[in-house]
Amino acid sequence: MLLPITALKRCCVFWGLAWLGMLVFAAPLHAQQRLIALDKLQSGLAFTGPEILDLQADDFANPALPAMDKGAKLWKQVAGKSDKSCQSCHGETSASMKGVATRYPAIDKASGQLFNLEDRIRQCRQKNQKASEWPLESDELLAMTLFVTSASNGMPIKVSVEGKAQSHFEAGQKIFMTRQGQMNLACTQCHDQRYGIKLFTDKLSQGQPNAYPAYRIEWQRLASLERRLRFCYTGVKAEVPAWGHKDMRDISLYLMWRAQGLSIEVPSVRK
Amino acid sequence: MTTARLQVPNRIIEGDVFKLRLLVQHPMDSGFLRDLEGVLVKRNVIRHLQCILHDKEVFRVEPTTGTSANPLFEFYLRATRSGELYFRWVDDKGYIGELRHNLVVEPANQSQAPKS
């Protein structure tokens, strides 16, 4: 009679564990639950090879530097009907723009929309400077964004997901967790669950946004976070949203929240 | 509009062999790629780049479509005397880029000072 009881016990233990396991995996994601612990966050640099590290660290050969120079030049350049440059109002970036990039995307008070740094620069240029529009992904806009972002270099990311931003955050989180495209993959499957594993020849990164706009070797130019996200959409063969789509801003916000504490790293180079 | 950056050692002493690095900002469009709207970008690469010192060509390169955007050129020169380094490059659109740098060569020191 001893044997069956032990077997029964084992059986109970097994089902108990299985049930517990199901409970853990089936539990709904809490609104602000982190899938990568804050102390486990790694910048994209941790997943690139030594060549990229060397290139980024090189104060001269870093290919993003010409854009930095261009941004610095544009900052001082008078433009539009207002006859003002960025510097006329904002002064030096080292003071006025310090830490700004760590807070974006953020809610624009006037329109109530979620703005990333590019949107903010475009708006300022249009409304205050009364100058010609810089299209998304144009050299000028990227250079300026890079220059403004560089004022926050080394500072930890901290975006607000409270108030009006909360719905955007939740929408972004939902997109991140939802399978999509012909490959039927969610962002989380690669960037939360499988980072560090190789996909073809490169390591999957955590998908951290702390180094954008970054110079991408593959595209041979500076690229925004939005363009990088679009590339992931193409990667999983999903329909790519239009440029400047709300979805892209929402994911950006989620990514920046997810990267809380990682420091801004520009000018950066990525594969 | 293209710009370029040049890197030379801070201190050059006569007889030294020193490294020059020139980074030219240029898209180097190969003619095979499309832009974000899917339109083929016409070929536009730097065809010819040269460096002249003391009215003499000391370095020349003729890049083609295989060279990356914002190419970095690295080469060595032996310092003899001070003079103006003159870089000139031409691309497919006929744009001519120029960069001038005043090269200062210090005379070799008799008193065995450590070279930088």
Image: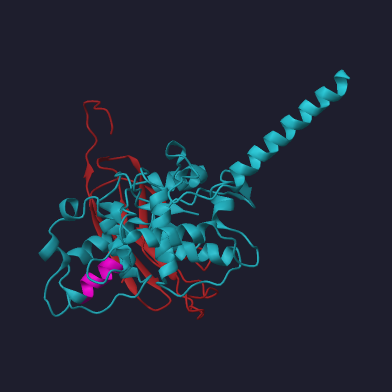
Chain colours: A cyan, B red
Q: Residue furthest right?
A: A1
**Which residue is at a point 48% across and 52% down the rendered structure image?**
A207
- Asked where in the image residue B113 lies, by quadrant, the reply is top left
Residue A122 is at least partly visible in this image = yes
Q: Residue furthest top?
A: A2
**Which residue is at a point 22% across and 32% down the rendered structure image?**
B109
Residue B70 is at least partly visible in this image = no
User: Depth check: A18 or A268 in front?
Assistant: A18
User: Depth check: B53 or A112 in front?
Assistant: A112
Residue A122 among those drawn in magenta: yes
User: Depth check: A175 or A242 in front?
Assistant: A175
**Which residue is at a point 29% across and 54% down the rendered structure image?**
A103
The quarter of the rendered structure image containing the N terminus of chain B is: bottom left
The quarter of the rendered structure image containing the C terminus of chain B is: top left
Look at the image and give the residue range highlighted in magenta: A119-126
Residue A54 position within the rendered picture, expressed as x and y whole percent measured from the top left: 44, 44
Residue A45 position within the rendered picture, expressed as x and y whole percent measured from the top left: 46, 45
